Image (cartoon, coloured by chain):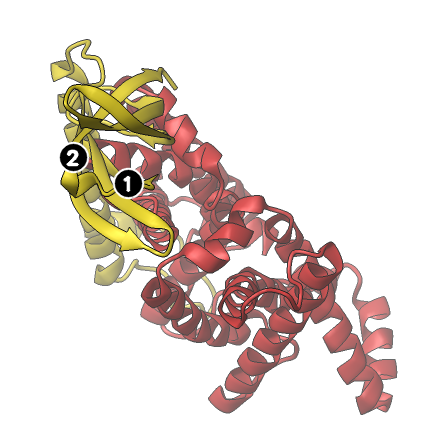
Chain colours: A yellow, B red
Amino acid sequence: MKNRAARQTPKRHGGGNEKPHTLEWVAGGLSAVVVLALVGFILYQAINATATKPNLRVLVEQVEVTDNGYRVNFRAVNRGGATAAGVEIEGRIEHDGETIETSRVTLDYIPPHSGQQGGLLFSQDPKRYRLRLAAKGYTDP
Amino acid sequence: MQKAGNRPAGQEIEKRVRQSPRRKLLIGLGRGFGGALIFGLPLLMTMEMWSLGFYMDRFRLALLLFLNMPLLTLLSYHAGFEETTCWHDDLRDMVVAYAIGIVASVIVLAVFGVVTLAMSADEIIGKVALQSVPASIGALLGRSQLGGSKAEASQGSERVNYASEMFLMAVGALFLGLNVAPTEEMVLISHKMTGWHAVALIALSIFLMHAFVYAVEFAGSDPSLPPGTPWWSAFLRFTITGYSIALLISLYALWTFGRTDDVGLMPVLISMVVLGFPAAIGAAAARLIL
């Protein structure tokens, strides 16, 4: 095939470019494999994708003391197959079943099978009471 | 080759320029600033670029700033301020272009009030450093864009020639890709797309790239694609290879701007394909626009 390609190509005066170098075929072949693998993977995912909704979960990572209060570092994870936009995260500190303090934050996007980190600020020490973090809502992007 | 049409005027200018080295230097610097603005302004006026300047990962910013050096040097070899004969000319042009990029970024960001003295040094340096990358590429391309000449693949051995064709494609991919890479829209578009959309976009990107490759072939300006080259040969050696380069550059840009952190494989691949679209057009059009 290579020889035929070379023969089909007319000779150019003093160019020395009549025959594509082996490197060009190697680069082309490798690239074809990469692009085919990409298309194959995306097609596989597209065929197997069921119409799922975002599945959100909020995990507390760390509670820190700041200059004027406390910070709860969290990671919101989306285990569903669709992106959640404008995800509202609410954190509550409860004591004897009563809410003492509430903090909220909105995350722009959480793509499917992805996470997003953030922080909630409180004036009371969350460690001394019961801390609840939950995703309250989202929109489709 | 491209200059054949307006050779007399070009020669006249060349002659006049040669008479005064200082004038030649000033023209070169002027074109550099012009190019820095043409290429850099869309990004200098992009909000995400300002915030990326202070929040993006410092290691990735440093890597970007470092990688820009060999990129500018190689670019200078292909299309510099002037004909370069040896590698330290290219190194000098690289430094000059970087300096122009930094100065242009400082001036424009300061005039916009995006960079003020009230900010921390970390923020100012981060913003300027990030903007200096596209601006310096623009400064180097200023000569080819504004000076009437074009960036051309080196006429060395076939291997060198092909590698430099691929390099110009990568620069073309950066040229269009960088302008949109930092924006929120890249992520937003990928969220709106399904896998089927992504496959359609890949097909569209490859089809348009190949159309551009053929446009070049018909123009007959490229010795690597002489008339009579079978379509699959050009397709495999230029279109597909160019598209992979565009995808790799897109992935690198997304990673640099932190768009891949803690994101699942599928969303990353789709945003790579989304950014790969302008990058592919840029790569394919490289030999027409650079």
| Displayed quadrant of residue B134 | bottom right
Q: Report helix, strand or loop for mark 1.
A: loop
**Is residue A33 at least partly visible in the picture?**
no
Please name the residue shown 42% across and 75% down the image.
B70
The C terminus of chain B, quarter of image: bottom right
SS assignment at label 2? loop
Residue at horizontal 54%, vertical 62%?
A: B127
Q: Which numbered disc, 1 or 2, marks the residue that appears first in the sequence? A: 1
Residue placed at 79% from the left, 76% from the top? B27
Percent x, y for residue B65?
A: 44, 70
For label 2, the residue is: A129
Check disc 1 and give the amino acid type.
Answer: Gln
Binning the other alpha carbons within 10 Å of mark 1 as few (below 14), some (14 to 19) or many (20 upward) gives: some
Label 2 is found on which chain of the structure? A
Q: CA distance from mark 1 to mark 2?
A: 9 Å
Q: Which mark is residue A124?
A: 1
Residue B62, horizontal then vertical, whole percent: 38, 70
Chain ID at mark 1 = A
